[in-house]
């Protein structure tokens, strides 16, 4: 048993609370959070001297298998390379304070189990398996003169591939069933054009109404939900009306689409840091000129989308969507958001709302009795300076996942 005493608690239920708490960790859960003195025979006691304790953060849109910025090339990596390159990506995410990650395409059940069983170090992984894309959609990385079969002999099983191409109602049903059988926690679809794909303008609508209905029906039958890559208001409203639960990116959303999201209780997962990072280092990372041009178009609009979503009361989770050597910018999403929404709201998005999105409310994203002991100890006040959570975790002096220290410099 472990007691963290003299802690300032920061979570969705503790914004301006200046009390000094004792947090009792028993095994992998939090047993108690109290202002009263605590004494337990044989317990390890660490005096935090007023340092901030907050929940481990949740990245609701990542591609942990994406070690190469060009997604088409990433999909051509040998399986061994794809997995081994993911290991340091996962390790670094955990050290930045992200104790849970929802993968948006690429990571599989085996990788999730490897983390769960302690084979490799990393955040808790909720995986989509392969994202579903129509031919010529955001998951189709063939150039216009490439007439090769995008999925010969089941190549969507290549571990480096983010998605798979599937067309028609019967085939999308089968694809969802295959991904669920293989251990996916949720289903990801491409519902509009994208930045990284070469032949689909941002404004394209992707998948037919009947295809999306079939995907949502199958996911619901498997007691899970659909997340959708979508940029424009038209694509967003269409997807949400058809039953999609979370909208990824959403940079070009409009008032009508935001109102539809609010009406249906859909979540938004903006990923602003990926456009910021791509504008800085995308060219040197091998991103094409056409993709960089599309990126700049949506980057500025994404900042405005945050204000619009807030105005309509749409719940937002934190996502990053980084690729290749841009993963190191993960924590900058906090800075970008806090400049617009404020530090407390941003932290709630990165914790409690993220827990709602992955179906773990009350278990993750809070410092409370009965919750998983996923905790960060921060040297500083993130409400006064969100920068203490950025970088590579230099100001996070303790990272705990499931009651075990990932690293700490407190004892």
Image (spheres, rainbow, N blue to C red):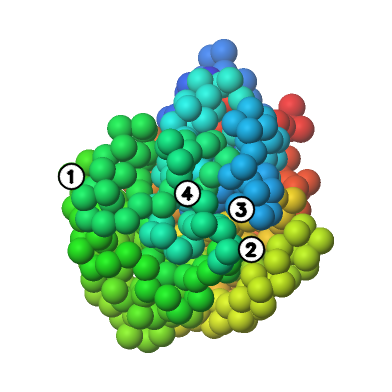
Percent from the top left, x then y, of residue 386? 68, 62
Label 3, label 1: how far apart the Cα atoms are: 31 Å
Identify the image quadrant of residue 364: top left
Label 2, label 1: how far apart the Cα atoms are: 33 Å
205 in relation to 72, above or below: below
> Who comes first in sequence, dot 2 or dot 3?
3
> Who comes first in sequence, dot 2 or dot 1?
1
Disc on res. 274: 2
**x 48%, y 31%: residue:** 112
Disc on res. 221: 1
In this rendering, does residue 42 appear at all?
Answer: yes
Secondary structure category for the residue under label 2: helix
Secondary structure category for the residue under label 3: helix
Percent from the top left, x then y, of residue 197? 56, 64
Percent from the top left, x then y, of residue 312? 37, 80
> Who comes first in sequence, dot 2 or dot 4?
4
Rate crowding at label 2 as few (under 14), some (14 to 19) or many (20 or more) other CA atoms within 10 Å: many
**x 35%, y 52%: residue:** 166
Eye-nearest disc, 4 or 1: 4
250 in relation to 356, above or below: below
Disc on res. 149: 4
Disc on res. 249: none
Secondary structure category for the residue under label 4: loop
**x 53%, y 24%: residue:** 114
């Amino acid at each position: 048993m472990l007691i963290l005493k003299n802690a300032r608690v920061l979570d969705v239920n503790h914004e301006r609370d200046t009390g000094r708490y004792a947090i009792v960790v028993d095994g992998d859960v939090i047993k108690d959070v109290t202002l009263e003195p605590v004494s337990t025979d044989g317990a390890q006691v660490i005096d935090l001297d007023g340092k901030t304790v907050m929940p481990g953060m949740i990245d609701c849109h990542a591609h942990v298998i994406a070690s190469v910025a060009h997604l088409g090339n990433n999909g051509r990596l040998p399986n061994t390379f794809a997995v081994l390159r993911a290991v340091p990506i996962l390790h670094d995410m955990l050290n930045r304070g992200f104790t849970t990650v929802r993968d948006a395409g690429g990571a599989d059940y085996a990788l999730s189990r490897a983390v769960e069983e302690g084979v490799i170090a990393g955040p808790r992984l909720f995986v989509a398996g392969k994202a579903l894309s129509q031919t010529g959609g955001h998951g189709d990385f063939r150039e216009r003169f490439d007439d090769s079969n995008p999925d010969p002999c089941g190549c969507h099983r290549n571990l480096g591939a983010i998605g798979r191409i599937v067309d028609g109602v019967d085939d999308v049903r089968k694809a969802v069933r295959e991904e669920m059988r293989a251990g996916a926690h949720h289903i990801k679809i491409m519902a509009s054009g994208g930045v990284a794909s070469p032949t689909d303008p941002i404004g394209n609508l992707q998948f037919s109404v009947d295809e999306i209905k079939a995907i949502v029906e199958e996911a619901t039958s498997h007691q899970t939900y659909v997340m959708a890559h979508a940029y424009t208001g038209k694509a967003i409203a269409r997807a949400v009306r058809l039953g999609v639960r979370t909208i990824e990116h959403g940079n070009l959303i409009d008032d009508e689409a935001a109102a539809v999201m609010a009406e249906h209780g859909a979540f938004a997962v903006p990923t602003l840091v990926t456009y910021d990072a791509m504008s800085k280092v995308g060219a040197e990372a091998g991103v094409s000129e056409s993709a960089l041009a599309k990126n700049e178009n949506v980057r500025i609009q994404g900042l405005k989308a945050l204000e619009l979503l807030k105005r309509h009361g749409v719940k937002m989770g934190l996502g990053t969507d980084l690729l290749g050597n841009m993963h190191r910018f993960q924590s900058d999403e906090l800075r970008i958001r806090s400049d617009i929404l404020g530090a407390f709201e941003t932290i709630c998005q990165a914790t409690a709302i993220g827990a709602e999105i992955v179906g773990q409310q009350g278990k993750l994203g809070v410092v409370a009795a009965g919750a998983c002991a996923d905790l960060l100890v921060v040297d500083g006040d993130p409400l006064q300076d969100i920068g203490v959570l950025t970088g590579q975790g230099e100001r996070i002096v303790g990272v705990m996942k499931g009651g075990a220290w990932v690293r700490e410099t407190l004892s």
